[in-house]
């Protein structure tokens, strides 16, 4: 049994949370969990992440990695080779498309393919304006005469 949540009442009293509600709606719509290709998501430090994906038998020319706003899309396809009759086929060589939702300000740094393991390095780069900053406490300014706007002085 599946319970769909209705987020409509939240839309009436919130501003700017559209992306959060869309993520929740998308998570509800997932029907089957696709387990191929297998992958790991590793947090290497506070702002660095790495996605490792097993893509045995697929070369770098057969892979396509794109970042569209806050979504990372990894596509792979392999042309079927007709080099004989398979008696057993245990190495998966099918096409795939895997999507990863990225947080704001997460960018792809690079990608590499070594021994059938695709590694995608991600970095969160928070703009300076959004970083916390320390406010210095200064000394109080002495009460002095009120400031006056100076007018042009004319010599008589």
Image (spheres, rainbow, N blue to C red):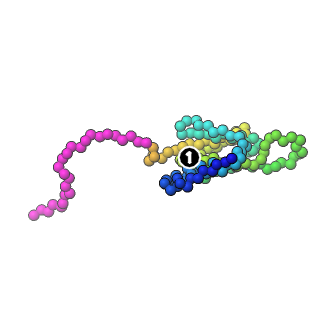
Instruction: Please indicate, yes or no, whether residue 29 appears anywhere in the rendered image.
Output: yes
> Residue 106 location in percent, x, y?
56, 46
- The image quadrant where one finds the C terminus is bottom left
Q: Is residue 89 left or right of residue 113?
A: right
Task: Classify 11 as above or below 39.
Answer: below
Of 39 and 122, which appears nearest the observer?
A: 39
Check the image and name the residue furthest to the front. Answer: 1
Q: Is residue 142 magenta?
A: yes
Residue placed under numbered mark 1 in the picture: 103
Question: Total label count?
Answer: 1
Please, is residue 42 above or below residue 69 in the view? above
At 71% from the left and 40% from the top, the residue drawn is 38
Residue range highlighted in magenta: 132-156
Q: Main secondary structure of the magenta part?
A: loop
Residue 60 seen: no
* Quarter of the rendering containing residue 54: top right
Residue 45 image offset from top left, x and y in percent: 55, 36
């Amino acid at each position: 049994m599946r319970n769909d949540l209705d987020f409509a009442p939240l839309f009436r009293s919130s501003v700017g949370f559209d992306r959060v509600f869309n993520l929740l709606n998308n998570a509800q719509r997932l029907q089957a969990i696709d387990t191929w290709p297998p992958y790991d998501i590793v947090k290497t430090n506070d702002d660095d992440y790495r996605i490792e994906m097993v893509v045995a038998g697929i070369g770098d020319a057969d892979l396509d990695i794109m970042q569209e706003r806050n979504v990372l899309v990894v596509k792979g396809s392999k042309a079927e080779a007709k080099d004989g009759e398979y008696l057993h086929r245990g190495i998966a060589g099918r096409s795939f498309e895997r999507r990863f939702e990225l947080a704001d300000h997460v960018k792809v740094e690079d990608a590499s393919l070594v021994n059938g393991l695709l590694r995608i390095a991600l970095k969160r780069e928070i703009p300076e304006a959004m970083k916390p900053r320390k406010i210095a406490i200064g000394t109080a300014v002495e009460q002095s005469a009120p400031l006056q706007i100076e007018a042009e002085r004319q010599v008589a």
